[in-house]
Amino acid sequence: MADILIIGAGGVGRVVAHKCAQQAEIFSNITLASRTESKCVQIAAEVKEKTGRTIQTASVDADKVPELVALIRRVKPFMVINVALPYQDLTIMDACLETGVHYLDTANYEPLDEAKFEYSWQWAYQERFKNAGLMALLGSGFDPGVTNVYCAHAVKHHFDHVETVDILDCNGGDHGYAFATNFNPEINIREVTSNGRYFENGKWIETRPMQFKRAFNFEQVGEKNMYLLYHEEMESLAQNLPGVKRLRFWMTFGEAYLKHLEVFRNIGLDSIEPIMFEGREIVPIQFLKALLPDPASLGPRTKGKTNIGCIVTGSKDGGELFTRYIYNICDHEACYAETYAQGVSYTTGVPAMIGAKQMITGTWMQAGVWNMEQLDPDPFMRDLNACGLPWVDVPYKPLDDISPQT
C-alpha cells in the first residue's frame, strides 16, 4: 500500500524492519538506512530469511539534512520511520518537510550537548507540518507510545475523569553481563542519572536521581525495586489528560546496575562535557558507550520477561474513584526467535510499525504534530493484540504514596 524509509539499524530498527516486512499488504517497499550500511545489510539478510521479502539498504548521516533529503528524494517514501538517535529528530523532521513526506519517531528530541529531553522543540513544528499537509507522530514506541495509548484507552472505555496515572516499566531480563544497557548506553545513562520529576496538582516536583523507590510484584517477573524517574510521556499526558492530579513514572533496576552507575558517576564517566585526552577531545560518556556491549547484541543472551503498564485511577459519571491496570508482558526469548532482537527493542519496534500502519491506512492520518494519546486508541490496541504485544486490562488498587529510599 505504501513505501517506507526506516532510518536507524540498531535493535529497534531491526524489529521495525522485520515487523513491517511481515505486513506486505501495508508496507509495499521497505528501505533501511543507517550511517553504517553493513548493519542494514545484515538486517536485510535476516528479514529475507524470516519473511522471504527483500528490503533495500542505504547509507545516510542523519545529522545532515542534505544527505537525508537526497536519500528521501531517491527512495520517494510515503513516510519516514525514525528509529535513529533522539539527537537526530529535528534534522529528520526538517528533511521530511523539505521533501513532503510524513514522519514518525519513538523518542523525543534531546540536544547532544545538554542532558535534557522534552517535546517543546518538536511541538514547535506543529504549524509547519499542518501547513504542509503532513503528519508527524511523536513517541510511537512503548514508553512513550503504548503507555500513552493505554491512558487514552482508559479514558475512552473506563473514565470520564482521570485522577492519577502511574507508569510502571519492569525489565526482568538477564543478559549475563556485569553491566549492559538495553538501549543506547549514552541515552540510557543520561536519562537515569538526571534528576527525576513528577507532576502533582498542576506543577512539576523535582527529585534527586533514585531518591524514591518502592517494591512492586510484577506478574510473571516477581517482586522488583522500582525507582521514580522523569519520562517524556508525562509531559504530553499532563497537557492531554484534562484535570489529572498526579503523573508518575517508575522503572526497575537491579542492585548491580545501580552500583556500576554509582561508580561511573563518581569517576565522571557519565559526563557529557568534553575533556582532553592525549591531545584530543573526547566526551566521557561516549567513551563509556564504546566500552559497553552493543544493545543490539543482547538478543541471543537475554532471558526473562518485561512487564510494562499503567495504573490509572479515576471516576465515571461523578461516582467513586476506581482503578484499572493495563499492561503487557513480553518474553525476551520469544522476541529473539521472531526478530533476532531482545524484548526491549521488540516492545519499541512493534508500536513503531503499528503507528506507521495507522498513518498509511488513513486511520490516524491528519496534518500536524501529534502525541499518541490524542488519537483514537481502539485500532492501535487491536493491532497490539494482533502483532505480538497483547495487553491485559483489569481492576486494580491505586499505587499508594511514595517515600524516600533508605
Image: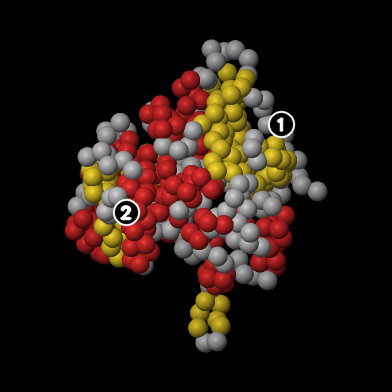
Q: Residue furthest bottom?
A: 279
Amino acid type of the residue tagged 2 in the rendering: Lys
Amino acid type of the residue tagged 1 in the rendering: Asp
Q: Is residue 22 left or right of residue 162?
A: left
At mark 1, the secondary structure is: loop
Question: Residue at 46% of width from left, 59% of height from top?
Answer: 111
Q: Which residue is mark 2?
A: 48
Question: Residue at 28% of width from left, 50% of height from top?
Answer: 53
Question: Residue at 54% of width from left, 28% of height from top?
Answer: 392
Crowdedness near tag 1: few (<14), some (14–19) or many (≥20) residues, C-alpha within 10 Å: few
| Disc number for residue 400 | 1
Q: Residue furthest right?
A: 406
Give the image location of residue 5, x and y in percent: 28, 52
* 179 to 276, vertically: above or below: above
Q: Earlier in the sequence, mark 2 or mark 1?
A: 2
* Residue 177, visible in the rendered structure: yes
